[in-house]
Amino acid sequence: MKKNLWIIVGIVLMIFGVVISYFGKFELADVLGLAGVMFGAGIVASQIWDKRDKSKPSWLAVVSIVLIAVGAFLLGFFQFEETTMNTIITTIFGLVAIIGGLVINFVKLPDKEAANNKES
């Protein structure tokens, strides 16, 4: 839990930004929401890169960060849509991209050396 604290903080900031943007009735709600989403995504991306497993291929961390960035982009910029259906669709795609990025980050790959030792 403690080693993933900043990832959790970043996700909470992203959720906070979406909630403020959707439900805020003041003038700067959209800008504050966008800033919260992007700042949270930046925290998550930096923590994923810093805490990546050096034994796993680095392309997994890159794919994870790209999916989180796409999700943050969808949540941040497309929340300005006027129709409810477009807002719902982009929110769902954004959340799916973020969840997919986190799942890819925390997936455990089989160890190649252990597999080679079993075959011998």
Image (cartoon, grey):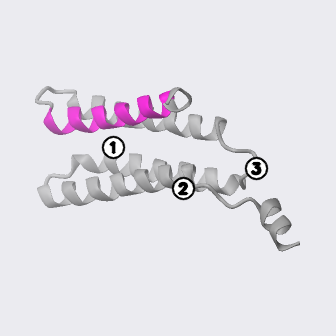
Looking at the image, residue 96 lies above or below residue 37: below
Decide if residue 106 is on the left or right side of residue 30: right
Mark 1: amino acid: Gly
> What percent of the width, then of the height, locates residue 24?
15, 31
- The answer to which quarter of the image holds residue 104 is bottom right
Q: Label 3, secondary structure: give it.
A: loop
Please tell me whether residue 112 is drawn above or below residue 77 in the rendered image.
below
Q: Is residue 42 inside the magenta stretch? A: no
Along the viewing direction, whichever of 105 and 1 lies nearer the viewer: 1
Choose the circle earlier in sequence order: 1 or 2.
Answer: 1
For disc 2, the marked residue is 104
Question: Can you tell which quarter of the image residue 23 is in?
Answer: top left
* Residue type beneath disc 2: Ile
The residue at the point 26 percent across, 39 percent down is 18
- Check disc 1: other Cα within 10 Å, few if <14, some if 14-19, many if 20+: many
Mark nearest the camera among 1 and 3 is 3
Q: Which residues are magenta?
A: 5-23
Q: CA distance from mark 3 to mark 2?
A: 15 Å
Q: Nearer the viewer, residue 62 or 106?
A: 106
Q: Which residue is mark 3?
A: 55
Label 2 Cα neighbours within 10 Å, binned few <14 / some 14-19 / many ≥20:
some
Asked whether residue 22 is drawn in magenta, I would say: yes
Q: Position of residue 72 (x, y in %)?
A: 40, 46
Mark 1 vs mark 3, CA separation in Å: 33 Å
Secondary structure of residue under mark 1 = helix
User: Within 10 angstroms of label 3, few (less than 14), some, or many (20 or more) residues?
Assistant: few
